[in-house]
Image: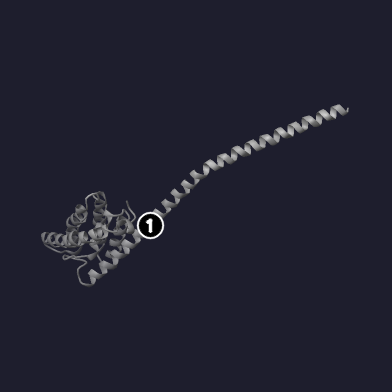
Amino acid sequence: CISFYAMLYSHTLSSLNTYVSTVNFFRHISRKSSECSKPSTRKTKLKEKRKMNQKVRYLVHAAAIAALYVVLTFLANALGLANYAVQLRFSEALTILPFFTPAAIPGLTVGCLLSNILTGCALPDIIFGTIATLIGAIFTYLLRKNKWLAPVPPILANTIIVPFVLLYAYGIQPIWLSFITVGAGEILSCGVLGLLLLNLLNKYRYQIFGEK
């Protein structure tokens, strides 16, 4: 009987030792697995944080550009240069900004929309003027590899679209004169002022826009 209990005790102790060894083995494997996953987890968190920072920066840039566009349009409007046949919007110099960041596309579009609404433009002007700005911004971004082409899309988009808006929304004639006046205003604001702004900002593009 004693030998039976001794044998039972020995088997139980052996089983416990085996169990403990097995548990310790899996703990060791789990710890190693956790240690191996930490670098990837850190990398994932860094990537997520970087993406979040990029989204925040995108929104901030878009909002700032929209606000600046509105302010500069109000300044031109106060001087009688924002609307109608003779247009020299200082805000149009900002149309080169898609060269630096895609955030300028919604920024310019929203800024133009708000500016047209707040300065009392007719509905066709609000709609098609905003579309012209959107088209110009998109193509400026697509042509961003060549800075000298940056002002071309907004100049063409506005020169082609705006004269028809002036004709059908405000009855301004002749249309050929609107092509001249709008085109000249766009060349001055986008081509001259815009390129001056582009060359100035290009020196600090990574500090301001963070785009590489």
Q: What colouring method underlies this structural image? A: one colour
Q: Is residue 28 above or below residue 66?
A: above
Within 10 Å of disc 1 (Cα), the crowding (few <14, some 14-19, many 20+) is: some
Q: Can residue 195 be seen from the camera position used here?
A: yes
Give the tally of numbered discs: 1
Q: Position of residue 145 (x, y in %)?
A: 24, 49
The amino acid pointed to by label 1 is: Arg
Q: Is residue 151 above or below residue 35?
A: below
Between residues 83 and 59, which one lies in front from this camera angle? 59
Q: Can residue 117 be seen from the camera position used here?
A: no
Q: Which residue is mark 1?
A: 57
Q: Position of residue 65 (x, y in %)?
A: 31, 61
Q: Position of residue 125 (x, y in %)?
A: 24, 61
Residue drawn at (30%, 55%) of the image? 105
Q: Is residue 101 above or below residue 84?
A: above
Between residues 82 and 41, which one lies in front from this camera angle? 41
Q: Secondary structure at mark 1?
A: helix
Between residues 37 and 107, which one lies in front from this camera angle? 37
Q: Is residue 44 left or right of residue 134?
A: right
